Image (cartoon, rainbow, N blue to C red):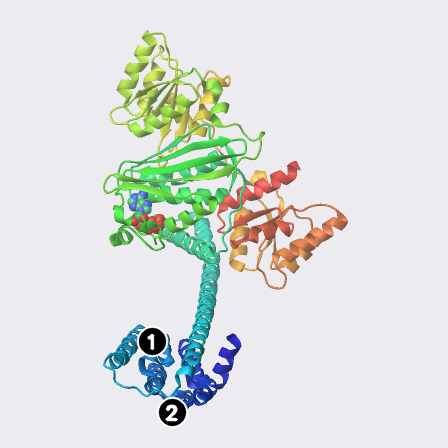
Amino acid sequence: MQPLRAWILRWLVPRELQADPATARQAVRTIVFALAMLLWWPIFTPVYIWLGSARAGAIITLGALSALAVIVCLGRIRSLVVAGNLTAAIVYLVLVGLASVAGGIEAAALWWLCAVPIIGLVLCGTRSGLSWAIVSALTILAFYTLHVLHVAVPHDIPADNVVLLDSLSMCGVVFCAFLLTLAFRQGEEAARQELERARDASEQANRAKSLLLANMSHEIRTPMNTVIGMTDLVLSTELSRDQREYLNIVQQSGESLLVLIDDILDFSLLEARRLTLYPQPFDMTSSICHALKALGARAQKQGLELVCRCDLAVPRVVIGDQGRLRQVLVNLIGNAIKFTPHGHVVLEVRCVECKPSGARVSFSVADTGIGIPPEKQEAIFRVFEQAEMSTKRRYGGAGLGLAISQELVQMMGGRIEVVSEVGRGSRFSFTVPLGIPGPDAEPPLVVRARPLAGHRALVVDDSAVSRDALADTLEQVGMVVARAPHGTRALELLHEAQAAAELFDVVITDAHMPMMDGFLLARRVRDDPRLPCRVIVMRAAGDVPRDEKYWEQAGVAAHLIKPVTPPELLDVLLNLLVVPTESTPRAAPQVRAPGHAEAAGGRRILLVDDSLMNQKLAATILGNGGYDVVIANDGREAVAAWQRQPVDLILMDIQMPEMDGFEATRLIREQERAAGGHVPIVALTAHALKGDRDQCLQAGMDGYIAKPLRARELLEAVASTLGADHHD
Ligand code: ADP
């Protein structure tokens, strides 16, 4: 069939009908039926003449000539519908003519009338097919009526030969039915292939578009990084109040733009199927804590309680994509904060299943915010969809976050679900399987904090959610917990306990409470010799930092910044209650940023980047951190600089003219193999496409720092790489 189709298309279909595939297909079909009519001629004309009907032979010849005319004039006929109906009419007229000269209702030709509606249907559509079916049926009825009325119809063929003609006709009908079925099947197959081709082409086009989008956002990201990084640097210098305010606005706008660009980048990578997960062992609890801490200031600004409830049996170290899991959590918590005017946001982490081979961990973020109407709860997971059009104006956002999060969670093997009620709040939750590295990974918090079991704690907080979450954490490790909603009640409980000789070991109190705040409570406890318990104060993220003397004077044994996460709370408690401590209460140790000048100790870093702006930014950050910086503009210069002088670390951009970062790293590693030694090379790039990270490691690099460059993060990464290398 295919070669016949190609032949017809090449030789018989006029060129003007070939431009559109659908028109060409219809033209081919019309010609096939007209050709079938032509084929009749050499078969049936001799048969009819031989059987004794020269008139029938003449009718078939006329029909064949008309079919030939349709084929030849196809390009000039007004439309293919007209041509199709013309073909059906020719067949019909030939058959009626044959029946009229060869026995009326008894004529074998009437069997063929079934072909006429089929031709009408295939060439011109359902309406035409139906019309021809009615015409054919009426024709048969008309011949039958003539038969009933005994109207004599010419019968050119002798009775002996009628059976032979009937048999021949039936064979013809059966054969045609077979050919039609075959043609139909092949037509279907061709249509399927065409559909697949069209789908592939559109998918490819879509992928190309997404890739273009990914590359564009990546290109925009690079200069944005410099803008933000430079603003960061200027902000760390002496400025007037107005200047600082303006620059803060520049930085905030830059950060929002970067979030948007990151979302577009992620979305286009997902669309182009270039986004992959990089499962690695990571400390899940501390990763969750970081995500939560990063959002603490935002929650506090809105006056919200941001609370973490964590099943302490969840494995600490798991195998998964830390960055992507954190991205989903930050998105969900960020949304919850954004859409909650007052109340609280609770992150809950539970271990659904925990086996040595792997765990299923469920995360949920619940808020007391504006809620989502039921009819929108599905739509918000689609790209650019927001629950209400006014949302964009009031709360900002592009409507990409949830779509990306849903895709990421699905890639991890889970699904985000939402339960929400307008005006009461929402709860987004998902459960994902995570691997477990091995028996020597860190024990879960519940095991680590076992020495706290049996200690007595009093939790004081005016927020019931926060109070219950803290108490729940402490009870999970076996501590005996009492709760108080304010300072006065706390003092009452403390005195009652003292009278019953069941002293509390520790009081954990919120700093901000009506009437009696946490500091006043701490002072009262300090001033009462009958209450020898220690006091931990939880202060808000945005509070003005005070020096350690202040805490000591207030009688505070340690302070924590809200949102308080279980690991830090338990660490402080272990420190205070289990490890033998000095008699005077002391403040919780403050983390100091690594990368201080003295830590750098004049170590030399080779910075390889072709962008002058990036060079300036990174060199300033590293210089401020006390490092000597040597600059190379591309891979070739980098190799030469490394050969010229020893360096402690190379920060290597990837895309550079002359020689890219991969090639330069390969050359350095080759030479090291011959001469010995190993200089740590860390990729410094905004690259986020699939495989880039693997490619960096494969090329022989030791690490990967993603731009945007933030002073603190860069210095931390440099310090830890140098530290690790030093220990090795
Ligand atoms: P964006 O927040 O940037 O608009 P998202 O995809 O993260 O995009 O969210 C889509 C929409 O879902 C939001 O615009 C908002 O209408 C709705 N939404 C998401 N989270 C919440 C929530 N916690 N409470 C109320 N509405 C929400």
Q: Position of residue 602 (x, y in %)?
A: 61, 43
At label 2, the amino acid type is Arg
The residue that label 1 is drawn on is 117
Q: In the rendered view, tell whether residue 120 sits above or below residue 344.
A: below
Residue 362 as seen in the image, left or right of residue 595? left
Residue 55, numbered circle: 2
Q: Residue furthest right?
A: 674
Foreground label between 2 and 1: 2
Q: Residues within 10 Å of mark 1 (few under 14, many from 20)?
A: many
Q: Is residue 293 left or right of residue 700?
A: left
Q: Earlier in the sequence, mark 2 or mark 1?
A: 2
Q: CA distance from mark 2 to mark 1?
A: 25 Å
Residue 378, given in percent of the width and then of the height, sits at 32, 49
The answer to which image quadrant residue 556 occupies is top left
Between 6 and 16, the residue placed more toward the observer is 6
Note whether 138 is above or below 593 in the view shown.
below
Q: Type of residue at label 1?
A: Pro
